Image (cartoon, rainbow, N blue to C red):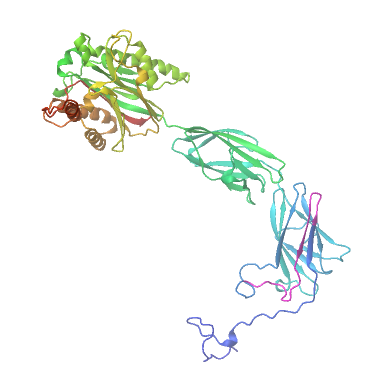
Amino acid sequence: GPPAPSTSPAVGGAAGRDLDARTLKRPRRRRRRRPFEPLRIAYLGRDREESLELGEQRDGGPGAANGDGELGGPEPVYDGAGSITVGSGTESAELTLKGTPGSVVRFSNMPVSGLGNDVVVLSTPDTPTTVAVPLRKGETREVVVTYCPPGWGIDVDDSLKFKLTLHRISSSAYLQSLVINPSETISIDPKFSPNTKKYAVSVPEDVKSITLNLTAQESGGRVSIGNSVIAGSYKRFGVSCQLTTEKIVLAPGPNNLKVTVQSEDRMNRETYSFRVVRKPRKLTFNSAAIMVPREDKKKRGGEDAFALFSADGNAISSGNVAPSPSMPSIMEGGYEASLKEVSVLAVSDGVSAWDSLGVDAGLYAKELMENLVESARANLNDQKRKQKKGALDLLTASWQKTNSKGSATVAVATLDETTLTAAIVGDSRFLVIREGQIHFISPKQEMEFNTPYQIANPDVNPEDLDLQTPRDAKKITLRGMRPGDIVIVATDGLFDNVFLEKIRRIAEKAVRLIAKEQLAGVISRTLMQQALENSKTVQGDTPWSRAAQEEVMREVRRIRREDGIDIDFEVVMGGKPDDICIVVAVVESA
């Protein structure tokens, strides 16, 4: 029967348990074994020779101890290990076994051909035992070899166990499959096939990098990407035949990518070519334009002008627009227009000094805008022939066609996919508002205070005038335009009377309160009202009054420095009455 409960002190220190010393498991006693010969496994193939010697004589017998010194454990314990590699042309590994005659060798984890079972009894040294282990190309198998010398018994505790790794070299350099990640947003044409070597891949613009999941037909080969290898060396296919590359960074537009696979035996090489196009998103402008002449110029239609041109060929220029009857009273006599899916925005300001020479200062600006529309229409036909033109090209083409006397400042902006190009002459400018902040503001071109750069036709104007051409324009390129960006193109009538921070706040408030479809029109009207109010004040602080005050102080300091005269001066206050032309465009996905 069971022993009586013990009253002796607890043994082992286990909390909550009282163990009698007699119930503790005693260490297993090892049998003394007779000397034996190590097991020798040799491979004598046509392409190579390899041999292993497993199981050197040990006093302690079989079963190496675990790290804690106890026998056994959840993980298998091996008395030795080794590996043999056979050539790609060898369908099975012909292994020769030598050891103590009469010993038993058991192969586990895979069948051994020609045996009928997995147990082999070793013959005499003069007649070695031979077994054949079948292997597929590129296959790696781990075989457990149990070696039982005579008299040891065949049970697990009375045997030696070895782990033998067999590998057949691969000769294939083909990929079995290829997946480009993120796969849900990427298209590949044609669908991947191991024998197809050229592919076209299209990825969205917001995908800046990709990874490749590669699966080889056979293991052991290695792969490189592009002209340089991954991480400075080849990546090797493991037993699973699968491999994931590191991130491959893509530039905007086309990227040429080559995946070169070399077989394990170095005899074969296959190259797969991919033209990966990071395709820009197609964007357009939803635009609204408004122009209000100065009070004394309304009968002539003012000296400012604007132009809008859409990708489908629709166009509006201020010269073809009648005064809007629905304008607020402060904007009476003004011109207003709107157009969707616009690709070209432009404003121009005729230089009023031509009035003193008897020339209508607005004629040149209006003709320039009309010719810009015609140049944009011609450019639309060129685009079908893949001859796209940017803002400076359009400005140059329209300037060459404009023959009226006079001169003008001008700002032209075009949107092609996600790239905005602009050409600026003088103090007509543009700015971009992104997420409620001013993202970009174009510079102002002036020869001196209140004398901006201005383009003109040199053939119809006096030779002694200092006039510019489109070659003097400031060329600007902004890449990565986004839906929701707000582009404001305007003449100096806006920028002289409204501070940039006020422009930003007006746009930001409109974005919060106004529907997207009406946003451009509401912002343009609000900016116009603010500019008109400021232009008529004689006491307020405006960009114009600050710039004029700085110019007065600069002149006062010059006179004091050069002539030694201390002169009186008046503080400049208020706005600048002027024609005002504003185009507001909201960037949208096409």
Q: Give the residues drawn in magenta, as a range.
A: 43-66
> What residue appears at the point 44 percent right and 32 percent down from the top-left corner?
280
Question: Which of the pair 490/65 is nearer the observer?
Answer: 490
Please state the horizontal and vertical placement of residue 292, each as a whole percent of the image: 20, 20
Q: Indicate the quadrant where residue 285 lies.
A: top left
Please say whether residue 517 is visible from this viewpoint. yes
Check the image and report above or below for 341 versus 44: above
Residue 125 in the figure: left or right of residue 516: right
127 in magenta: no
Residue 584 in the figure: left or right of residue 274: left
Please say whether residue 413 is visible from this viewpoint. no
Residue 514 in the figure: left or right of residue 478: left
Question: Which of the pair 578/39 is nearer the observer?
Answer: 578
Question: Which of the pair 423/315 is nearer the observer?
Answer: 423
Q: Indicate the quadrant where residue 583 lies.
A: top left
Check the image and report above or below for 292 versus 554: above
Please state the horizontal and vertical placement of residue 208, each as a whole percent of the image: 46, 39
